[in-house]
């Protein structure tokens, strides 16, 4: 059973930084394309960034240049480094894993990121 455990959310002022982490257990990390999604209050869930086992990355336009996704394959962990945070970045952030062979998908429990003065 694949499990994703997230950490690193919290409260930060505009212009600040946070780093999210997500560790996968229960399967082979290299078989998964990892990603981060977010759901702002009153809005649908949206893609933030993805990273393949090869470390090829993809970003939403709204976070390009401010957020960096990375993965440590030896620790089965994906990270999201968030800089220059704005009020619009406030959301619940979800870790996502998609098996590149079967298409099976898994979600983390979500971690709250609040950007506020």
Image: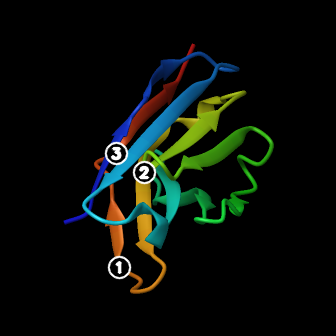
Quarter of the image where one finds residue 101: bottom left
Mark 1 or mark 2: name the one nearer the start of the chain.
2
Residue 75: x percent and y percent? 44, 45
Quarter of the image where one finds residue 49: bottom right
Q: Can residue 41 be seen from the camera position used here?
A: no
The secondary structure type at the circle numbered 3 is loop
Q: Quickly name the residue at label 1.
A: 104
> Crowdedness of circle 2 by 10 Å Cα count: few (<14), some, many (20+)?
some
* Left or right: where 4 falls relative to 71: left
Residue 108: x percent and y percent? 32, 52
What residue is drawn where x is 37% and y is 46%? Answer: 23
The C terminus lies in which quarter of the figure? Answer: top right
The secondary structure type at the circle numbered 2 is loop
Residue 89: x percent and y percent? 59, 37
* Left or right: where 22 falls relative to 65: left
Out of 100 and 15, give the one closest to the viewer.
100
The N terminus lies in which quarter of the figure? Answer: bottom left
Q: Quickly name the residue at label 3.
A: 110
Relative to 71, is 115 above or below?
above
What residue is drawn where x is 65% and y is 20%? Answer: 14
> Crowdedness of circle 1 by 10 Å Cα count: few (<14), some, many (20+)?
few
CA separation in Å, label 1 and label 3: 19 Å
Residue 86: x percent and y percent? 66, 30
Mark 1 or mark 3: name the one nearer the start of the chain.
1
Q: Residue furthest bottom?
A: 102
Relative to 33, is 80 above or below?
above
What residue is drawn where x is 63% and y is 47%? Answer: 69
Mark 2 or mark 3: name the one nearer the start of the chain.
2
* Of marks 2 and 3, the one in the foreground: 2
Determine whether label 1 and label 3 are within 8 Å by CB. no
Q: Can residue 96 be seen from the camera position used here?
A: yes
Q: Quickly name the residue at label 2.
A: 76
């Amino acid at each position: 059973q694949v499990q994703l455990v997230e950490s690193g959310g919290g409260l930060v002022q505009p212009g600040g930084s946070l780093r999210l982490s997500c560790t996968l257990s229960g399967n082979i990390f290299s078989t998964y394309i990892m990603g981060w999604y977010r759901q702002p209050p009153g809005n649908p869930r949206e893609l933030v960034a993805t990273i393949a086992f090869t470390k090829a990355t993809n970003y939403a336009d709204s976070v390009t240049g401010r957020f960096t996704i990375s993965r440590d394959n030896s620790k089965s962990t994906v990270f999201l480094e968030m800089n220059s945070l704005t009020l619009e970045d406030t959301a619940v952030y979800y870790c996502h894993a998609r098996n590149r062979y079967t298409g099976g998908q898994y979600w983390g429990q979500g971690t709250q990121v609040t950007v506020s003065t």
